[in-house]
Image (tube, helix red, strand yellow):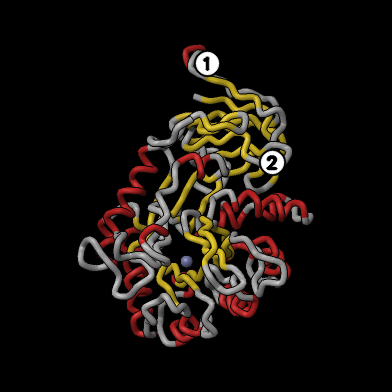
Amino acid sequence: MLLIRNADVYAPRPLGPQTLLIGGGKVLWTGPGSQLPDLPAVLQAAVTSIDLGGKRLIPGLIDGHVHVTGGGGEAGFRTRVPPVPLTRFTGSGVSTVVGLLGTDDVARGPRGLLAATYALREEGLNAYAYAGGYHVPPRTLTGSVRGDIVFLEPLLGIGEVAISDHRSSQPTLDEILRLASDAHVAGLMTGKAGILHLHLGDGPRGLDLVRRALAQSEIPPRVFNPTHVNRRRALFDEALELAKAGCTIDLTAFPVEEGEDAYSAADALRRYLASGAPPERVTISSDAGGCLPCFDADGRVTHMDVGAAGALLETLRDLLAGGLPLEHALPPFTANPAALLRLSGKGQIATGADADLVALDATGAADTVIIRGVVHVQDGSPVRRGTFETV
Ligand SMILES: [Zn+2]
């Protein structure tokens, strides 16, 4: 068992100084100030103590869009990104990931995605995944995406299915409706999220398919979950309207250049919150492991960058520097994705919740990271590493 002392808790609600007792992967007890739990002597001997010295303690971040196998492959086989090692997540305060397949769902497939997801679980991370990938019809293991979600425990929904993108299969309305219905029905059968996570490209059709799907079917808006919606400013405005209509929209924490027709995730969230759209219907993800090609003035690829999970804490820092209180900045990284993904016990700090906890240092970096009660990062350094990570 672990006793965490002198934690300034944001649950995300600010709770002030607290002591927490952790055991069996859960938060067993919380008490105000330096109050201690009343434990029998036999248990006291089994308790290890961590003094956070007043550091802010937040729920572990939930990154809902991660290429755990590595993404890429768009400019030749050598541009296939390698799998993302454990400490890239844990060192960045991420305790839960949802893995997915992107452009390359041919050389990669559901077997490799599930294997990478299980590998991260064995290494101590909370890991889930989506059925399918960019293209329609989707690759499956059981013969249908609905069957995959129903029978394969880590799969929470379908994604990332590409629309309004030259790399998509140009899916029709009927195809999108069929996928959304498969996700929704599988969600009903299993209690899982049952969502259709949609990759939005730069195409001018934007979210037109989603609007038509909502207008022409009985499928609830929550099933449609568009991502990368901050990549074009006009697309973001369309997404705001969908959030007001009941969809949860996902912002990507990619780098944005000065003068680009895009919003950084921090700018987009500030605009989202100022718009009066429901604060619980927005999430932020990193696209970690995804390939970010960099082009020169002639449009040639100069080098390949890779999305990193650290972009989430950088975005949080940006939000705090802009004056947003921590309790308002945290939900898109914690409580909101937990609600969308129906991960009960995650995204919050409370008695009975999973002990996924991150202590932030004064600069906003991850000082201590605990996942299901196990310490992964202490004093800013990883104390557990992935199987093939060298010190
Ligand atoms: Zn994508």
Q: Could you classify mark 1 by the number of other residues whose Cα lies within 10 Å: few (under 14), some (14-19), or many (20 or more)? A: few
The answer to whether marks 2 and 1 mark residues whose Cβ atoms lie closer than 8 Å is no
Q: Quadrant of residue 10?
A: top right
Q: Which amino acid is tagged 1? A: Gln
- Residue 82 in picture, x, y percent from top left: 40, 50
Q: Which mark is residue 69?
A: none
Q: Kindly identify the residue that appears in the image at 36 percent across and 49 percent down.
A: 117
Q: Quadrant of residue 121?
A: top left
> Among all residues in the image, which is located at the extreme left?
143
Q: Kindly identify the residue that appears in the image at 50 percent across and 73 percent down.
A: 200
* 94 versus 106 height, above or below: above
Tag count: 2
Left/right placement of residue 53 relative to residue 164 reads: right
Q: Kindly identify the residue that appears in the image at 67 percent across and 72 percent down.
A: 260
Q: Nearer the viewer, residue 109 or 271?
A: 109
Write down the residue under mark 1: 44
Q: Of helix, strand and loop, which one carries label 1?
A: helix
- Earlier in the chain: of badge 2 and badge 1, it is 2
- Residue 1 in picture, x, y percent from top left: 49, 24
Residue 143 in view here: yes
Q: Could you classify mark 2 by the number of other residues whose Cα lies within 10 Å: few (under 14), some (14-19), or many (20 or more)? A: few
Write down the residue under mark 2: 15
Residue 352 in view here: no
- Residue 120 in picture, x, y percent from top left: 39, 43
Q: Which amino acid is tagged 2? A: Leu
